[in-house]
Amino acid sequence: MTSLVRDLINTVHGEGDTSHSVDPPMQNVLDQLAQLHGQAIENLDVAQARVQPSPTDAVAALLRAQGKNPSPEALIPRVKSEDRSIPGGNGALWIRIYTPEGKGPFPLVVYFHGGGWVIADKNTYDAGARGLCDAASAIVVSVDYRRAPEHKFPTAWNDAIAAYDWVVANAAALNGDPRRVALAGESAGGNLAVATAIAARNRGSHQAVGVLAIYPVAQTGNTETQSYDDSANAKPLNKAMIGWFLDKLVTSPADKADTRLDLINADLVGLPPVTIINAEIDPLRSDGEMLETALKEAGVDVTRKVYTGVTHEFFGMGAVVPKAREAVEFAANQLRRDFGGPKSSSAQAGAQPRAPVAPEEPIAPRLAAIGYAAKHSFSDLKPFKFERQAALADEIEIDVLFCGVCHSDIHQIKNEWDNTIYPCVPGHEVVGRVRRAGAAVTRHAVGDLVGVGCMIDSCRQCEPCLAGDENYCEGPNSWLATYNGPMIPASKAPGGKNTYARDNTFGGYSNVLVVQEDFALKIPANLRPEVAAPILCAGVTTYSPMKHWGVKQGDRVGIIGFGGLGDMAAKIALAMGAEVTLFTTTKEKLEEAGRLGATGVLESDSSALESLQGKFDFLLSTIPQKHDINPYIPLLKRDKTLCIVGALEPMEGVNNQAVAFHRRNVAGSLIGSLQETQEVLDFCARHDIGPDIELINVDQINEAVKRAIDGDVRFRSVINMASIGSVDAGATVEDAAIFVSA
Ligand SMILES: [Zn+2]
Ligand SMILES: [Zn+2]
């Protein structure tokens, strides 16, 4: 497994191994539950399953054995409760209203119980709801939404919205404050709480002030998560039970992709603060972690706490499990914060809140566009419809023909630089044909073949920009990237400035691109357009430093790393007349190097490295992640330079003895300027060189990404964008949501 894949898995399963040691009080409940001789639900029919002993029954039995009264009223005497029916989405729903001690008006919590949408009700989950009422001093309304299989998906979701609306409308009559309503739920109900907040966001009125999701079901498509694995046979919830619940819930497997169930792939932007509580020993623990990531990446204020040594359903066990009392106290603190009460010190562990993205004022007609986007760091790329602003006077609209798949796209999709803005439409090696030109455009005409690399704008005023080094722009937001917005986002810019007036940009994995005419390059007639695409990034990234450090005829140049960048670097250096040595970890690539006209050397061959000491005029490292350059520094002649272009992260330390003794230089370089990009395109056309490419259809993009992570492939995948026409009709309802962006 490559380190990248490992990192990716760690991102999704970041909590590492769980000990699985159950706290003694929790173990007492599980032992008591076993003594009640319930049968495994997954082997029963629905009617039998609904009458099996529950963890709540086990807690009551334990209390009785201790000589205590297990009735809810005896355990939490300060709370009054009353059952009544309300109009639901289709017929009446039963609710239980818990009212705390005191005068009011109180804030309110609409609470949804668990039970996999099939079993259990407000009685089973009485303790959690009652405990919240007491601890948060809020009216809690627990809802008996209709259950499957009598009422399949999405009946419960519609009932949840109806109940929420009823509470908002009747808050005052309940001695509550309609401006302070929160949503909460456990397990299946945790999902309903988040889904109801999304529904409220969608219609734009009466949003809750906060959401409390206790071990929520955040998705059902992936049952290979770490917690599904390490807690597959946990009690009282196991993996088989979840399968049994889903079987009763959904009408067809397609329901699982509905974003009411598949919360992690829903549009979460603009939700109120969310608090997630998880139990360590629970198949749904990783669901909570994924939901936390998805919310963070959508800019939502999210706080998550995992309680160790306890299991699913622990939240309502405060009478016998101390961690449950802690969790209720924590949840109540979070709710008080959401209600505008005193802030708790533990409440700010999550991401900084970000203002919801407001659609921009339309200042020009908009173009419908379709692309491939990642919604989150753990998501595959999927079809995505959006809009671009039509070309202004000095801009051109480009029908994208080809787009290269660069390693930095992969870093960005996976949020490995910790700056990705989602949804993320990657792609910065774009070749296309001008479809329309603005009235003031002079450099390009309709029908021209043009290329767009990493940049689509820069400040045009700073010293580097005026010197033609746009790629080193020192404006407040640096240059504007073809995707993922300005290189320096407003949050990191002086005075919070955003001179480009856009947070996100959508790149070339799409059918159309709009760009300032200065930032579009001319594709020479004798360069195949699909081959030109990777030159716009991989080509210029290697050409620019070789030009800057003056590589010339007869120089000896070493290229470290023989992937896509190394391949381009070697071809360009050879065309410049240099003698080229390629350093690779792969034996098979030694021959490849020979075929190019270069010498191949294994990075592990220390005697070969020894014999090359002091021989090189220039070294270029193209390895796309952190690596040790110390073995190569001694290879440089006096005054010569080793330049790193592949890795953009902290590197291992350098032995300065090797640097100082021969006044050598260790340097870095970032892509290239517009002029250099045009030069390298013309240079490649003149010398008839280009990257080795493999054309793929856009629906093969996720495989291509996996291959690039795993295989250190030398060829470049290039998307044939004509294939995107065929995905349009297949886009799902959710994918068809229109996101407005520049
Ligand atoms: Zn690139
Ligand atoms: Zn600038």
Image (tube, helix red, strand yellow):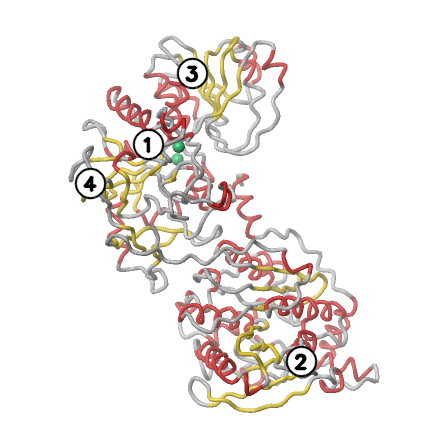
- The residue that label 4 is drawn on is 434
Gap between marks 4 and 3 measured at Cα: 35 Å
Q: Secondary structure at mark 1?
A: helix
- Mark 4 neighbour density, 10 Å: few (under 14) some (14–19) many (20 or more): many
Of label 4 and label 3, which has the lower sequence position? 4
Q: Amino acid at mark 4?
A: Val
Image quarter of the N terminus? top right
Q: Residue furthest right?
A: 67
Percent of width and height locating residue 172: 55, 84
Gap between marks 1 and 3 measured at Cα: 20 Å
Q: Is residue 49 visible?
A: no
- Mark 1 neighbour density, 10 Å: few (under 14) some (14–19) many (20 or more): many
- The residue that label 3 is drawn on is 549
Of label 2 and label 1, which has the lower sequence position? 2
Gap between marks 2 and 3 measured at Cα: 72 Å
Of label 1 and label 3, which has the lower sequence position? 1
Query: Is the distance from the Cβ of mark 4 to the nearest ligand 1 atom less than 8 Å?
Result: no
Asked if residue 561 lies left or right of residue 524, the reply is right
Q: Amino acid at mark 1?
A: Leu
| Cβ–Cβ under 8 Å for marks 1 and 3 | no
| Cβ–Cβ under 8 Å for marks 2 and 3 | no
Of label 4 and label 2, which has the lower sequence position? 2
Q: Residue at x 37, y 32 (%)?
A: 461
Q: Is residue 202 visible?
A: yes
Along the viewing direction, whichever of 586 and 374 lies nearer the viewer: 374
- The residue that label 1 is drawn on is 536
Whether residue 426 is situated above or below residue 126 in the rendered picture: above
Q: Quadrant of residue 581?
A: top left
Of label 2 and label 3, which has the lower sequence position? 2
Whether residue 559 is situated above or below residue 378 in the rendered picture: above
| Cβ–Cβ under 8 Å for marks 4 and 3 | no
Q: Secondary structure at mark 2?
A: helix
